[in-house]
Image (tube, helix red, strand yellow):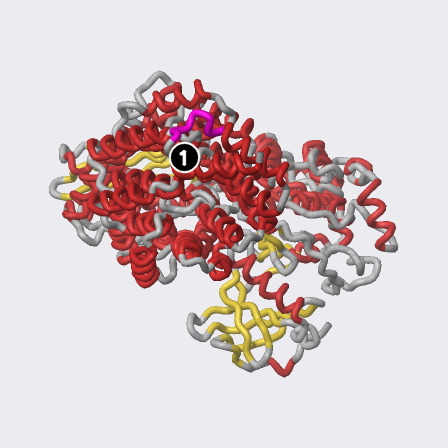
Amino acid sequence: MQGNDSLLDKTFSHYHILKQLGAGGMGVVYKAEDTRLHRPVALKFLPGELGEDHATLERFRREAQAASALNHPNICTVYDIGEQDAKAFIAMEYLDGTTLKDRIGGKPLLLEEVLGLGIQIADGLDAANTKGIVHRDIKPANIFVTERQHIKILDFGLAKLVSKRDVDATLSFDATEGGGADQLTMPGTPIGTVAYMSPEQVRGEELDARTDLFSFGVVLYEMATGTRPFSGDTSAVITEAILNRTPTPLRRLIPHASNALQRIITKALEKDRKLRYQQAADILADLQGVKTATESGRRPSVSVGNWFSALRSRRLAIVGSLVFVAVLVGLWLFLPRHAHALRSTDTVVLADFANSTGDAIFDDTLKQGLATDLQQSPFLNILPDQKVRATLKLMGRSADERLTEEVAQELCQRTASRAVIAGSIASLGSEYVVGLNAVDCQTGEFLARQQVQAVKKEDVLNALDQAATKLREDVGESLSSVQKYETPLIQATTPSLEALKAYTLGFRAERTTGGAAAIPLYQRAIELDPNFAVPYEALGHNYRALAEFELANENFQQAYDLSGRVSENEKYGISAAYYSFVTGELQKADQTYELWAQDYPRSYAPHNNLGVNLVALGQYDKALDEFLEASRLSPDNAIPYANLVGTYCQLNRLGEAKAAYQLAISRKLDRASLHSNRYGVAFLEGDVQETERQAAWAMGKPGVEDRFLSAQSDTEAFSGRLGKARELSRHAVDSARQAGEKETPAEWELNAALREAEFGNTSQARSATAAARALASTRTVQILAALALARAGDSDRAQKMADELQKQNPLNTVINGYFLATIRATIEVNRKSPAKAIEILQVAGPYEFGSPDPDPVLSATLYPIYVRGLAYLQLHQGNEAAAEFQKFLDHPGVVVNCPLGALAHLGLARSYALQGDAAKARATYHDFLTLWKDADPDIPILIAAKAEYAKLQ
């Protein structure tokens, strides 16, 4: 298909079109000048007739989105996407060279070329697949070889995100390679180019990254032999070969073919994807291994095909050898040595700085600054602190031992990491010298060295930043990545060494002693530099861990206000926390977490925190996927495991919940939520000994004990033992006060107040609510107080509080969609307007199965469902009411020991009575009374239940 020459010499946005480069079925490409940056670019337009097709436009946009999400030297960079005069276009990196299809040209390539180009293709695929992007159309025509022999993967128009699990039924005709039998794409089949499709792609099955690896195997075969492994005159013949036939071995076509390359291609072309390479990093490692072995025993350059063409005269061979040696020496002396550069899959260990200045201000501080600087990089994979501490213990050392270069070297080897990055600072008169070394811990070879001078102490952080930036380039990170993720260190942290020192001490205290010990140190860092954003964020998370939600939100707000001063990595975390906890816009928070995970695919935090939000919304299956990924990325971190235990429980998968708990314990991981979630599993299984064991673990631990005391109070209340529940709640309040907590005592009072309201003790509920409000007046307290007052029948005060909460939190998903809907619906039930209550609760539908903040308030579980059930009872609609109360029985892992779970049996009994089904009603009343056989006899709702049951006899 030819392009439209009428576009020549025209300007689209700030791109001036110079000439047409090529045209195909899915696009016309022009060379253009970026008039702003004065650089050449490639502009891709849709052909005229396709530009009006919605599906094609969407695929075109998807190409830009998929490619722009990737930042890798072997993937064509997308600069921009736009539309003008009803013409959509993509602005891309301009490349000089040729496609791999033209490079092959039906002839085999040299073994060195196959390996060199293949390694680059595999590295690019690894980058795409790591971000969950499956290309789905890997073929020589979509792979570009620049004049400098750099590979660029093109055309992500058919790409998909595997996490979306969308089976794409779109059809495609590939006209970019001449059509006909040479390059076939079958109508009526999943998109792609049939000669390069995997068996699962041919069958139209759902695809994952392994389909790209099969297609890559086809490309490798074609590079090595000059022919495709699966060929034929029709699409049917080709697909039959892909599904059922084994390609001709390389040796039959090429007498001198590499056995090692044959093994790689054979594994890549396995028809059963379970037996194929599972990830691009694996095939990349194998190709690099063959390349290393080939170079160590190098023969003269031999074509994998025309091996006899290597025979030359002896004299020519000698001259060639001398030239070859000269070239090698020249390369060694004058070119950057990336032969030993890091790969994106390599892990590196940060050693402590060697400080010979005698100034303690540099102790630990520079390592923290270097960590912050390097963690901006999506390329570098720093060994997580949890893994460092766990490995040190296995080495028989203290988890807090200083990481000298020697200790770091051993730790690097034990964790199968690739390199140690060690820093040093020394005095040079009144100046300072900052040095960084990256050393291969397996061979001892230097991968990179940097040394920068600072005129005075205040310049040390700038010097460290310069050294770190150069080091990132030297160890293999692309220049475009370094430039994109290069926030100056004094901006990403602070220009104050003293403030950075205080923050570093706080970080160390948090990981060794706990968040409470870190708080004053983070506060000191802020005193020294009020514009230091990161300590505010750290304070926010630590206050949340202590259930001091108001203080947490104040600090998250401050961090967000200063987020223009942080790195991209930190900005994601700060923004997501702000949306999650301050404004409560969970959709915005989730979008931020997803972007964070795409840019930093090795970070566990976005997956874990996204999972927490999904739990709040009741999307437990999706949350489980995120927690599993978080635990995979950070296997020595207790947080994802604790969340796994809780989410398996919420999904009623108790065996897997216990297994996740045992795995965490076997890894020597410990966290209060790990034990509290295990407590919930034990409750559901009726394992009293285990609940007592978990509660005993918490006793005597400030800031933890009160949580378990309140949980035990709900356990007692679940069986109607209200007196014991009240006593345990009092202990929980006292324990929280003794631990110095401010907001939590009020929350335990309100937990008890809600319980009293549901059991019919409205005066006790109101007095407990007043006591709680006297202790604290935070947002969390106001929410629970309004709910307790509404359930206790104080509708007027509850209404005023609800109106004020809505005014103060107009965007908050959970407050408006869950709590305020429940409060307002309760008020309508109190006013005998059940139909209006049910209408109000429609907004809670998407969230009603969630486990929302404020946390941990177990008595708030499934509240919208419970109130809707009460409204249907008022309307005498027994069937509808029964459906609501049945939800409690169907979701025990969400309800756990919330007393509403017990009362749901009574609601169900009343629903059956309204239906006129006396037998079911009697049986369900009996179930409730059996559950409450040891209940305190004076509980109003129990007295009413006994009277109702007696009438049915």
- Observer-nearest residue: 772 or 471? 772
Q: Position of residue 746 (x, y in %)?
A: 26, 42
Q: Quadrant of the C terminus?
A: top right
In the depicted structure, whether residue 763 falls above or below residue 699: below
Q: Position of residue 90 (x, y in %)?
A: 56, 68
- Observer-nearest residue: 541 or 468? 541
Q: Say which amino acid is labelled 1.
A: Ile
Q: Which residues are magenta?
A: 931-937
**Residue drawn at x 38%, y 42% as measured from the top left:** 760
Q: Quadrant of the N terminus?
A: bottom right
Residue 814 seen anywhere in this rendered image of the structure: no
How many discs appear?
A: 1
Q: Position of residue 193 (x, y in %)?
A: 74, 55
As for residue 138 lying within the magenta part, the answer is: no
**Residue drawn at x 25%, y 44% as measured from the top left:** 767
**Residue drawn at x 50%, y 69% as measured from the top left:** 40
| Secondary structure character of the magenta stretch overall | loop
* In the displayed structure image, the side of residue 248 where residue 339 appears, left or right: left
Q: Which residue is mark 1?
A: 639
* In the displayed structure image, the side of residue 493 where residue 621 appears, left or right: right
